[in-house]
Image (cartoon, grey):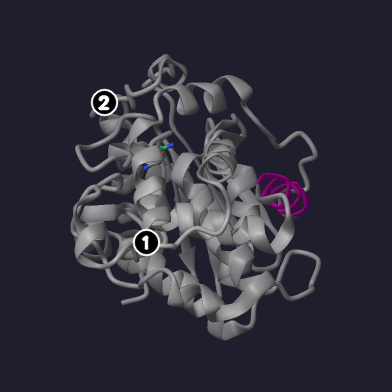
Amino acid sequence: MDYQAVLQEVAAFARPLVGRGQVAQYIPALADVDAERFGIAVADVNGEVHGVGDWQEPFSVQSISKAFSLALVLAEGGERIWDRVGTEPSGNPFNSLVQLEYENGIPRNPFINAGALVVTDRLQSLTGDAGTTMLEFLRAESGNPDVAFDPVVAASEAEHGDRNAALAHFMASYGNLDNPVTTVLEHYFRQCAIRMSCRDLALAAAFLARHGVRNDGTRLLPAREAKQVNAVMLTCGTYDAAGSFAYRVGLPGKSGVGGGIVAVIPGRCTLCVWSPGLDTYGNSVAGVAALDHFTTVTGWSVF
Ligand code: GLN
């Protein structure tokens, strides 16, 4: 496969959609990002990396971090996490509260905010420092020691974090958090505020294409748990648009409101695309179109 040529073709296809949609507005640090950016990178299972456009420019990973925190919790603590968070799509926006009361404080899945808060709580209990654990993992896998939290974004998240605080307190009232709400929120906001490029993210998520094996050849997850992460990414990774994402792209994918999407082709490669304009569900408009075109051109959807 001539990845470079395919990525160029995909970027040309997505170009007319770059700037469409709306850049995330809920914090100034994200609202200020240039909507005209577009980058895409691919890391294959042998560690080869290719990219086009703004593929080396760092952006705010936001909810893409939820895939890494889930993987790290499975690696550190195994499948007991599934007693505290479900594996069903929510069909509701990522920051919704409505289902929590009916389901006794057990979030529908680990990729809506409520579920990610539980996963972060568990990672904190398992490691004593959830944020640093994730940062170290991402630096190691990307080979980029400069991967870091953006303190301005993290502070802004906290300042505008009433809804996430409400979710955390509500789950705490059901006994589904072990650490203080303030600790869980602090680590959750920090992980959302990590800045990485498409290149860094494609490499960092390569273990999901390698059935759990890291870039240095050691194993992060048993194949069964890598399968679980990929499956939940497919069904829940793009929130209440996961059905349409599966239908259009046909890959496990995890999006973030910074405009990034990581997508996995098990056994072959990991992709990361970035363009900040979002649809009403919070997924990158040009990013989804680019991944749709990639699987159409290559025939590499999981279907
Ligand atoms: N930091 C954002 C929030 O918690 C992340 C949401 C997202 O990327 N979908 O609301």
Q: Nearer the viewer, residue 3 or 284?
A: 284
Residue 163 image-quadrant placement = top left
- Residue 42 colored magenta? no
Residue 74: horizontal and vertical position, in percent? 60, 72
Mark 2, secondary structure of its residue:
loop
Task: Work out whether 197 lies above or below 117.
Answer: above
Secondary structure mostly seen in magenta is: helix
Mark 1 Cα within 10 Å, few/some/many (few <14, many 20+)?
few
Q: Residue at x 55, y 56 (%)?
A: 121
Callout 2, which amino acid? Gln
Residue 102: horizontal and vertical position, in percent? 19, 65
**Residue at numbered disc 2:** 22
Residue 23's label in the rendered image is none
Mark 1, secondary structure of its residue:
loop
Cα gap from disc 1 to disc 2, whole angstroms: 36 Å
Q: Dividing the image into four quarters, tell me where ligand 1 lies.
A: top left
Question: Where are the magenta residues, as a range?
Answer: 131-140
Residue 262: horizontal and vertical position, in percent? 47, 52
Which of the two discs, 1 and 2, sits closer to the camera?
1
Mark 1 CB within 8 Å of ligand 1: no
Point out the image quarter for the N terminus.
Answer: bottom right
Q: Nearer the viewer, residue 235 or 105?
A: 105
Residue 174's label in the rendered image is 1
Task: Work out whether 57 lies above or below 183.
Answer: above
Q: State whether residue 2 appears in this view.
A: no
Q: Residue at x 34, y 50 (%)?
A: 170
Q: Is residue 134 left or right of residue 239?
A: right
Q: Residue at x 46, y 70 (%)?
A: 230
Mark 2 Cα within 10 Å, few/some/many (few <14, many 20+)?
some
